[in-house]
């Protein structure tokens, strides 16, 4: 990261607090809802992507470990991660994910972003109005998972498509940690590609940005607990509102 003005460093720190809050509060959206703002401060995607990736690896693994230790505790309770469905989804996504990482298929970024965010906007409205889409169609689910896997390989905007499918099959109390486990696997592949390509991982900046993300993470954990105690329609309206915000920001960026 080049030398920036003090105000830029402050803004970047605050955005990473926001990123940690969204990630732990909902289990997704930390990257998509922070990257557009980061690029407004300093337009350098390859600076931020390794930072966001490492934060996700650290906090997702830590959250899953602590939640399972607290929940299981020798009681034989169910894991907070739905591993059975996660492996099924990953089996569908892994091929397109690798294609995206290595850039074997290329589409104009504006077209790709426009398509994905238009679909996500439809999903978000269905959640907001408490009429969530239920495809009951394995082919449709597979198409969205494959598209989400490919897009997550090329960028960081694949999560909303994946969420649209996974949220139909995983109980809401296990949804966040299941997504965390899935993101951990997908981001590990992405990080391996960064190392292979010689991308600067910005290790020095983790010293001050990890604590920023940790502050947001702790706040987000409390918000998540409140969401789980709320009625299911409220939970999905919050999810839908975040997806709608992602879609609006994404469509604006794509058409701009």
Image (cartoon, grey):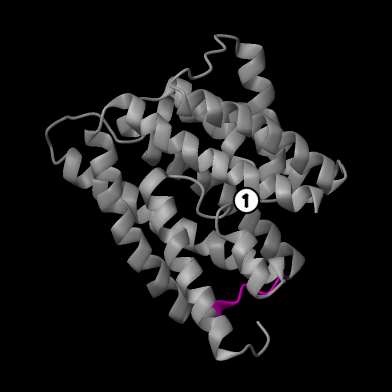
Magenta-highlighted residues: 199-204
Instruction: Tell me: 114 left or right of 239.
Output: right
Q: Position of residue 35 (x, y in %)?
A: 61, 60
Q: Please say if 230 is above or below 156.
A: above
Q: Please say if 136 is above or below 207.
A: above
Is the N terminus in the top left, top right, bottom left or bottom right quadrant? bottom right
Please name the residue shown 76% across and 34% down the image: 115
Residue 201, magenta (yes or no): yes
Rendering quarter of residue 256: bottom right
Please name the residue shown 31% across and 25% down the image: 232
Instruction: Tell me: 173 left or right of 118.
Output: left
| Label 1: which secondary element | helix
Q: Position of residue 216 (x, y in %)?
A: 37, 63
Please name the residue shown 50% across and 27% down the image: 166
Residue 147 or residue 133, whichever sits in front:
133
Residue 217 or residue 33, whichever sits in front:
33
Instruction: Give the residue number, with chain letter if any, for mark 1.
Output: 189
Residue 249, magenta (yes or no): no
Instruction: Tell me: 98 left or right of 9.
Output: right
Residue extending furthest toward the front: 129
Rendering quarter of residue 151: top right
Q: Position of residue 190 (x, y in %)?
A: 64, 54
Q: Position of residue 254 (x, y in %)?
A: 77, 49
């Amino acid at each position: 990261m080049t030398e920036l003005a003090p105000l830029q460093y402050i803004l970047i720190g605050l955005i990473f607090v926001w990123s940690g809050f969204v990630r732990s509060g909902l289990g997704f959206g930390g990257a998509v809802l922070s990257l557009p703002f980061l690029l407004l401060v300093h337009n350098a995607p390859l600076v931020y992507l390794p930072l966001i990736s490492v934060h996700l690896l650290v906090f997702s693994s830590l959250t899953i470990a602590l939640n399972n230790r607290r929940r299981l505790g020798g009681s034989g309770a169910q894991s907070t991660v739905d591993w059975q469905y996660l492996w099924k989804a990953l089996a569908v996504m892994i091929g397109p994910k690798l294609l995206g990482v290595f850039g074997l298929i290329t589409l104009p970024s504006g077209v790709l972003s426009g398509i994905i965010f238009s679909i996500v906007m439809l999903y978000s409205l269905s959640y907001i109005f408490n009429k969530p889409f239920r495809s009951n169609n394995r082919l449709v689910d597979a198409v969205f998972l494959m598209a989400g896997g490919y897009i997550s390989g090329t960028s960081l905007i694949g999560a909303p498509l994946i969420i649209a499918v996974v949220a139909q099959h995983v109980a809401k109390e296990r949804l966040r940690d299941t997504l965390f486990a899935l993101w951990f696997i997908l981001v590990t592949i992405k990080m391996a590609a960064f190392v292979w390509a010689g991308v600067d991982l910005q290790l020095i900046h983790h010293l001050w940005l990890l604590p920023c993300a940790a502050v947001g993470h702790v706040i987000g954990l409390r918000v998540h607990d409140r969401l789980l105690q709320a009625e299911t329609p409220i939970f999905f309206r919050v999810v839908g509102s975040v997806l709608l915000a992602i879609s609006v920001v994404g469509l604006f960026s794509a058409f701009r």
